[in-house]
Image: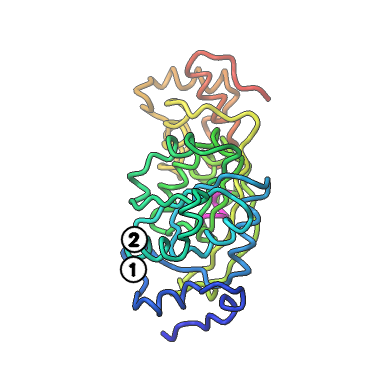
C-alpha cells in the first residue's frame, strides 16, 4: 500500500510521524498495534480536549513519535509519556530534548501493562488527565485501568476504535450496550467527541476511530465484588434471563438471588442488557444487605 502524503503535518512546522519514520528507516510494528495519526490538526484538537483546564498534568499512553506530545507541551501541560518501543523512545528523546531537560516532559520507556498508573498519577501535580491513541489490541485492558484511576483524574481522553467508543457511550437496551458500557458509566460520563476516519492513520486500519471524553462522575458507583460479578455474569450469558445468568453467582443460592432482586426491584425474567448502571448497583447493595442505591 502506498503511504499517505504527510504534507498537512509538515505544514504545522513539526516533523510528521511519517517523516520521522522515513528519516530513521523505521516501519510501524504490527505486534505493537502501531497506527500513527498523521494529521497535526487532529492531534492538536485532541490535545486541546485533554488540556481543557489549562496547565494540566497529562499522562500520555503510547507517545509514539510525539504527535500528541508536542501539542500537549505547546499548551503548557506537564507530560509524563509512556512508550514501549525503544526505537521510538530514542526519537522522543531527540525530538523533545529541551522539555525533557526542563522537566516539563518525563518519558517512561516501558510496556504500559507493567506501569503502575495509579502511583504515576499520584506523583503528578493536579489537575491530571489521562490521554492517548490506544492500540486496538490493548484498548479493553487500558480502559479497565482508566476506570480504576477515575478518582485521580479530571478527565480521560482517548482515540479508540469507533466501535469501542460507541460501546462506551451506549445506553441500556441498545445493541452496543454491554459490560464495558456499565463499568465505564459507573464512574465516568462518556461522550464521543469526534470521529477520525481511517485514512488519517499510517498504516491505515480497517476501521474508523473516534475520540471519547470520559468525565468522572461526582458520585461514582463502588465497583464491589458483587457489582463486578453481577455485570460480568449478565453479559457473559447475554441471551439468558437474569434468573439463569445469575444462577450460582458469588456462590449464592437461587433463593438469595430472588430475595435480592425483590429488594432491588429487579425483574429476573429480563436480560442484563436492559439494566442501567443504577439497577446493577441496587442489586449489588441488596445482596450485601443494603437498602439500595440512591436514585
| Most common SS among magenta residues | helix
Q: Residue at label 2?
A: 85
Element type where label 1 sits in the image: loop
2 or 1: mark nearer the eye: 2
- Callouts 2 and 1 close, C-beta under 8 Å: yes
Q: Is residue 88 left or right of residue 75?
A: left
**Which quarter of the rendering shows the N terminus?**
bottom left
Examine the image and state in which quarter residue 187 appears. top right
- Marking on residue 218: none
Query: Residue 67 in the image: x percent, y percent?
Result: 52, 65
**Which quarter of the rendering shows the C terminus?**
top right
> Is the residue marked by circle 2 packed among few (<14), some (14-19), or many (20+) residues within 10 Å?
some
- How many numbered circles does the render carry? 2
Residue 181 inside the magenta-drawn segment: no
Front-lying residue, 232 or 134: 134
Element type where label 2 sits in the image: loop
Examine the image and state in which quarter residue 144 appears. top left
| The residue stretch that appears in magenta | 164-168
Amino acid at each position: 500500500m502506498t503511504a499517505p502524503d504527510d504534507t498537512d503535518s509538515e505544514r504545522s512546522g513539526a516533523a510528521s510521524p511519517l517523516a520521522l519514520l522515513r528519516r530513521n528507516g523505521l516501519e510501524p510494528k504490527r505486534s505493537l498495534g502501531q497506527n500513527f495519526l498523521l494529521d497535526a490538526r487532529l492531534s492538536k484538537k485532541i490535545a486541546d480536549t485533554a488540556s481543557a483546564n489549562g496547565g494540566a498534568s497529562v499522562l500520555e499512553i503510547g507517545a509514539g513519535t510525539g504527535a500528541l506530545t508536542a501539542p500537549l507541551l505547546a499548551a503548557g501541560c506537564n507530560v509524563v509519556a509512556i512508550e514501549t518501543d525503544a526505537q521510538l523512545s530514542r526519537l522522543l528523546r531527540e525530538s523533545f530534548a529541551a522539555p525533557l531537560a526542563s522537566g516539563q516532559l518525563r518519558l517512561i520507556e516501558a510496556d504500559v501493562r507493567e506501569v503502575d498508573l495509579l502511583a504515576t498519577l499520584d506523583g503528578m501535580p493536579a489537575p491530571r488527565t489521562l490521554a492517548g491513541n490506544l492500540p486496538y489490541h490493548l484498548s479493553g485492558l487500558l480502559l479497565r485501568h482508566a476506570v480504576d484511576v477515575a478518582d485521580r483524574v479530571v478527565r480521560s481522553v482517548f482515540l479508540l476504535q469507533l466501535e469501542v467508543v460507541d460501546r462506551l457511550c451506549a445506553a441500556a437496551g441498545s445493541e452496543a450496550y454491554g459490560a464495558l458500557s456499565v463499568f465505564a458509566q459507573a464512574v465516568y460520563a462518556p461522550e464521543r467527541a469526534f470521529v477520525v476516519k481511517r485514512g488519517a492513520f499510517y498504516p491505515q486500519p480497517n476501521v474508523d476511530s473516534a475520540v471519547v471524553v470520559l468525565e468522572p462522575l461526582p458520585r461514582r458507583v463502588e465497583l464491589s465484588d458483587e457489582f463486578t460479578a453481577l455485570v460480568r455474569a449478565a453479559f457473559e450469558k447475554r441471551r439468558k434471563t437474569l434468573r439463569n445468568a445469575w444462577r450460582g453467582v458469588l456462590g449464592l443460592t437461587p433463593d438469595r438471588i430472588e430475595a435480592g432482586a425483590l429488594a432491588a426491584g429487579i425483574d429476573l425474567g429480563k436480560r442484563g442488557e436492559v439494566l442501567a448502571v443504577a439497577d446493577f448497583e441496587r442489586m449489588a447493595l441488596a445482596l450485601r444487605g443494603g437498602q439500595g442505591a440512591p436514585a
